[in-house]
Image (cartoon, helix red, strand yellow):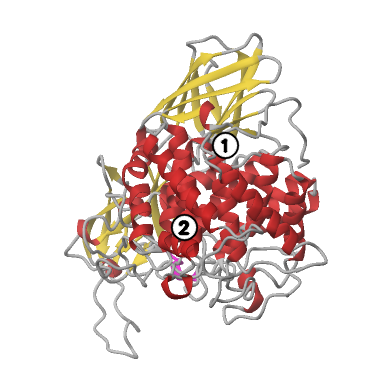
């Protein structure tokens, strides 16, 4: 798993990409070379452009979080600041989302709004580069007085990531000066021998590395590496959330075996560790990050790709501690997992990480926004026992686990994170190397790559995936001589897949299939994936769902929702796994049984209760990402077998 440069493959600083490594096995493709043109994700991106991003921007104004920056300019923060201490970061994530959207489809409105916000930030920034509305003003708490909970470096990191996106998307508007000044301040303040601390919420690490990749300034990479090396020295204070594990400060990153503590923090740290490892050539650090993430995937990750089993501390549980009805699985943790998986895919070339990205996108990210794009899930449970509670209208919601989407939260990291992820999603479709083009995610798209010293190759992808398993790839540009078109065969295809067309008739097992030949424009390759429904058995080590099964179809996890079977108590149904599921356009139907309701009272309830199969019933499963869009409901993914 060595990290090697890609010969003379282009890695220009200005390419519109959220992640732009200078070395690795695979080279990501920028927006100019990968564009989603239709289907599932085009609809999600349109929703993002038309509703999610405007809603986030409007909400930031409504709740006063952008007003905090104006108060910083006016010198009135002591009396006017509102919201929690990390609200600045949400402004930066929305700016990042606007930058990607503007790059995808030029918008004078978005460009103008970015210019307006940039000018406001420039006016609020201190002369030494410091920029934060919660700390460092007369009458307020001092700078870096609370590294455990203060989120100052976290906010600075999101500022830098927004700046990188804007610059790469051609909308600088002065943001480069703001980000460089902020980064230079961090490097001076936290240099070795100065303030040798770390932020309780990792994020600055990956931001500094990306700024290094953009600017070539070695001090940014060096500072990111210092932050990684300092983590685990137990410099942060103890917490009630599992001690210093909460913010990954108990064990050095090189020595840890699995992700612990607050799930988003742990995953952001891992993403930063991969970035530092790749750019500094630290093989041991790369292996450590991969080892921790792999074990977390194997033992601490929910079926839908969600991470984080504990409501207390939004944290990972122990191995196989994955209760369905208490799943936290924060949307931001899913996005952070995608960040790690993408970096490991680029660094190692291992296709299984693209499987992780697919599963998490379809079942966590897609589930977060409601159908109107103006309400969002914070957590993504797999079992809702009682109907959800509608949030209080007109105010940011304090409650994140009520089984209903809220228009805004007092901590609204998830809507803004979804906005920037969907806006940049084209960049996660495909990669290239010296030999050819690799397609990792299937959506209608135009994809092209320049092969070093040879010219451009390109394909057009046509498909109704994930609802249909036929993926048609047409060659639209080519070079003389052979080159390789590589296709991901999803891990969920138990029997493999079939490839027909210009490359012949090929059976392909899970992983990556390489098709190497001399191609002609107009030739087609057809990938046939069996997207029929399948039954998935629970790992017996997961006590909470032992003896249960779930239904999947292609990359989609399905669920029972009470609105589709209003006369049933979903806690008293079982599924007959011997019955072959049937399909309609929107659901999968299987035979189940209604179990007798135990008559005993506590403490003997259920003891010796009859386990007769009960009356047969047809159970109607729908895609998990759609749930809770039709009013309050109960829901479950894992169902006991008959």
- Magenta range: 543-547
The front one of 181 and 287 is 181
Q: In the rendering, which numbered label is found on residue 419? A: none
Q: Is residue 83 magenta?
A: no
* Local SS, label 1: helix
Q: Which residue position is annotated with label 2? A: 90
Please tell me whether residue 151 is drawn above or below residue 93 in the rendered image. Answer: below
Give the side of residue 571 with respect to residue 500, left or right: left
Give the side of residue 581 with respect to residue 198, left or right: left
Give the side of residue 637 with respect to residue 440, left or right: left
Figure quadrant of residue 601? bottom left
Q: Which residue position is annotated with label 1? A: 168
Structural crowding at the residue carrying mark 2, measured as other residues with C-alpha within 10 Å and reported as few (<14), some (14–19) or many (≥20) = many
Quadrant into which the N terminus falls: top right
Please tell me whether residue 437 is drawn above or below residue 259 in the rendered image. Answer: above
Figure quadrant of residue 261? bottom right
The front one of 631 and 205 is 205
Residue visible at 40% across and 28% down?
37
Residue 185: give x, y in percent of width and height.
69, 58
Q: Is residue 624 visible?
A: no
Residue 325: give x, y in percent of width and height.
39, 69
Mark 1 and mark 2 in contact? Answer it, CB < 8 Å.
Answer: no
């Amino acid at each position: 798993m060595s990290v090697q440069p890609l010969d003379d493959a282009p890695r220009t600083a200005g390419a519109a990409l959220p992640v732009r490594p200078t070395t690795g096995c695979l080279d990501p493709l920028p927006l100019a070379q990968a564009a989603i043109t239709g289907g599932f994700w085009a609809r999600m991106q349109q929703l993002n452009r038309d509703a999610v991003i405007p809603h986030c921007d409007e909400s930031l104004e409504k709740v006063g979080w952008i007003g905090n920056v104006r108060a910083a300019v006016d010198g009135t923060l002591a009396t006017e600041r509102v919201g929690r201490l990390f609200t600045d970061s949400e402004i930066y994530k929305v700016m990042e989302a606007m930058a990607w959207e503007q790059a995808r489809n030029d918008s004078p409105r978005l460009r103008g709004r970015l210019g307006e916000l940039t000018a406001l930030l420039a006016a609020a920034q201190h002369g030494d580069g410091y920029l934060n509305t919660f700390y460092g003003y007369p009458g307020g708490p001092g700078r870096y007085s609370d590294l455990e909970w203060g989120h100052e470096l976290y906010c600075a990191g999101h500022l830098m990531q927004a700046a990188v996106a804007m610059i790469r998307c051609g909308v600088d508007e002065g943001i480069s000066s703001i980000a460089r000044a902020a980064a230079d301040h961090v490097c001076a303040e936290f240099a070795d021998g100065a303030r040798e601390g770390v932020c309780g919420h990792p994020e600055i690490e990956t931001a500094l590395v990306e700024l290094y990749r953009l600017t070539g300034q070695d001090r940014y990479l060096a500072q990111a590496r210092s932050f990684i090396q300092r983590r685990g020295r137990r410099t942060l204070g103890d917490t009630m959330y599992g001690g210093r594990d909460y913010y990954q400060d108990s064990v050095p990153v090189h020595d840890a075996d699995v992700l612990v503590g607050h799930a988003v923090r742990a995953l952001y740290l891992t993403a930063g560790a991969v970035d530092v490892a790749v750019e500094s050539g630290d093989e041991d650090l790369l292996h450590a990050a991969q080892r921790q993430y792999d074990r977390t995937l194997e033992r601490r990750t929910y079926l839908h790709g969600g991470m984080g089993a504990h409501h207390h501390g939004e944290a990972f549980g122990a191995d196989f501690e994955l209760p369905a009805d208490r799943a936290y699985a924060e949307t931001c943790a899913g996005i952070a997992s995608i960040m790690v998986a993408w970096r490991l895919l680029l660094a190692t070339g291992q296709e299984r990480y693209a499987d992780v990205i697919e599963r998490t996108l379809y079942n966590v990210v897609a589930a977060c926004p409601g159908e109107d794009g103006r309400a969002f899930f914070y957590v993504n449970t797999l079992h809702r026992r009682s109907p959800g509670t509608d949030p209080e209208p007109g105010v940011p919601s304090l409650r994140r686990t009520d089984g209903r989407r809220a228009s805004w939260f007092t901590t609204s990291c998830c809507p803004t994170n979804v906005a920037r992820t969907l806006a940049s999603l084209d960049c996660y479709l495909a990669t290239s190397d010296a030999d050819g083009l690799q397609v990792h995610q299937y959506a209608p798209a135009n994809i092209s790559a320049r092969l070093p010293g040879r010219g451009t190759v390109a394909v057009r992808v046509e498909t109704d995936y994930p609802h249909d398993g036929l993926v048609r790839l047409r060659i639209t540009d080519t070079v003389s001589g052979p080159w390789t078109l590589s296709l991901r065969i999803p891990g969920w295809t138990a029997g493999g897949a079939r490839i027909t067309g210009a490359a012949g008739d090929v059976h392909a097992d899970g992983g990556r299939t390489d098709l190497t030949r001399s191609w002609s424009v107009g030739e087609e390759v057809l990938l046939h994936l069996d997207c029929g429904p399948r039954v998935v058995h629970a790992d017996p080590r997961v006590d909470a769902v032992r003896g249960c099964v779930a239904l999947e179809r292609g990359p989609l996890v399905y669920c029972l929702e009470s609105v589709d079977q209003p006369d049933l108590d979903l806690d008293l149904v079982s599924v007959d796994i011997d019955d072959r599921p049937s399909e309609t356009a929107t659901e999968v139907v299987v035979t189940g049984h209604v179990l007798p309701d135990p008559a005993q009272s506590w403490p003997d309830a259920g003891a010796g209760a009859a386990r007769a199969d009960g009356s047969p019933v047809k159970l109607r499963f729908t895609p998990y990402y759609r749930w809770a869009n039709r009013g309050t409901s109960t829901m479950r993914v894992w169902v006991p077998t008959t």
